[in-house]
Image (spheres, rainbow, N blue to C red):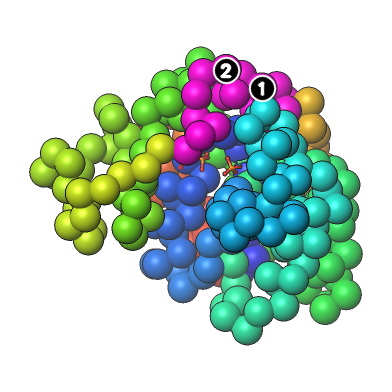
């Protein structure tokens, strides 16, 4: 299956992609993670991306499409993937359609995780991640069973993203509404947009996504 998880920053795309990929044998492809890896590597692309990301704006279509088109060639994606955070502009969506069509493929579904803006600032500013295994947590909504210890790997080191602060979040929400929301009618017209309620508990959101996926198998 070839899927997109679409929604504003903090909607739960990454949280759900990590849960769904294990059960359905898919691979999560997060362009945010790829760009953060480019920054960590000190590459020229990383340097350019960092300035844009720190301001909460979108990295150019050229850079992001370049990174994704390379990654889509990898053999580990044979059973399918979940795009998380890509596409974010109509230009990126058109580029993705072309990349897939060139190899005789197409998307199976675009799952919109619908969350109102008023919930997103709290979700994003409370987000943190295990520094060792990458498991995601939240100060209020997803705490480790033992305070300060990762449930999955036992590490006691955690990180927070530099752009998860209230000022940058507002910029990121503006970018979402101006540039990414137009993807909703774009995919609705193609008949592949499925909208689910992202304002319920994490487990219940996963249940709704499972239902959609079972319907398209
Ligand atoms: P995105 O990948 O869409 O930016 P995340 O999956 O990182 O968003 O979720 C943002 C934060 O909100 C995380 O800390 C996560 O634990 C929390 N979260 C995700 N889904 C829910 C939910 N349904 N209810 C409450 N908190 C959630
Ligand atoms: P995310 O991890 O999805 O929240 O993305 C973090 C930041 O990376 C965004 O605020 C953008 O600056 C950048 N980014 C991630 N994916 C894309 C994309 N598809 N297009 C443009 N910029 C992106």
- Could you say where residue 72 lies in the image, as x and y percent from the top left? 70, 71
Q: Residues within 10 Å of mark 2 (few under 14, many from 20)?
A: few
Q: Is residue 172 magenta?
A: yes
- Could you say where residue 122 lies in the image, as x and y percent from the top left? 42, 21
In contact (CB < 8 Å): disc 1 and disc 2: yes
Residue corresponding to mark 1: 171
Quarter containing ligand 2?
top right
> Which of 211/20 is in front?
20
- Could you say where residue 9 lies in the image, as x and y percent from the top left? 57, 34
Residue drawn at 83 percent across, 78 percent down: 104
Give the side of residue 66 with respect to residue 125, left or right: right
Ligand 2 contact, mark 1 (Cβ < 8 Å) = no
Label 1, label 2: how far apart the Cα atoms are: 7 Å
Q: Quadrant of residue 171?
A: top right
Residue drawn at 67 percent across, 28 percent down: 55
Give the side of residue 158 with respect to residue 194, left or right: left
* The N terminus, quarter of image: bottom right
SS at circle 2: helix
Give the side of residue 118 with respect to residue 57, left or right: left
Residue drawn at 51 percent across, 18 percent down: 166
* The C terminus, quarter of image: bottom right
Residue corresponding to mark 2: 167
Res. 19 in view? yes
Q: Is residue 189 magenta?
A: no
Residue drawn at 74 percent across, 54 percent down: 45
- Could you say where residue 10 lies in the image, as x and y percent from the top left? 50, 33
Q: Which range of residues does the magenta coloring cover?
A: 161-177
């Amino acid at each position: 299956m070839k899927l997109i998880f679409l929604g504003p920053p903090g909607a739960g795309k990454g949280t759900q992609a990590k849960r769904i990929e294990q059960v359905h044998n898919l691979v999560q492809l997060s362009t945010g993670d790829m760009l953060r890896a480019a920054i960590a590597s000190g590459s020229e692309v990383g340097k350019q991306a960092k300035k844009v990301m720190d301001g909460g704006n979108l990295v150019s279509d050229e850079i992001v499409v370049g990174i994704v088109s390379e990654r889509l060639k990898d053999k580990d994606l044979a059973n399918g993937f979940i795009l998380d955070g890509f596409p974010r502009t109509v230009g990126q969506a058109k580029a993705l359609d072309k990349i897939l069509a060139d190899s005789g493929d197409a998307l199976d579904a675009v799952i919109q995780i619908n969350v109102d803006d008023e919930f997103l600032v709290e979700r994003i500013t409370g987000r943190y991640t295990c520094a060792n295994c990458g498991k995601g947590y939240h100060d209020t909504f997803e705490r480790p069973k033992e305070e300060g210890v990762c449930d999955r790997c036992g590490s006691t080191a955690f990180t927070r993203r530099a752009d998860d602060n209230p000022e940058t979040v507002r910029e990121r929400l503006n970018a979402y509404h101006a540039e990414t929301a137009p993807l909703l009618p774009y995919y609705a017209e193609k008949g592949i947009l499925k909208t689910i309620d992202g304002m319920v508990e994490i487990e219940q959101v996963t249940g709704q996504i499972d239902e959609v996926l079972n319907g398209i198998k």
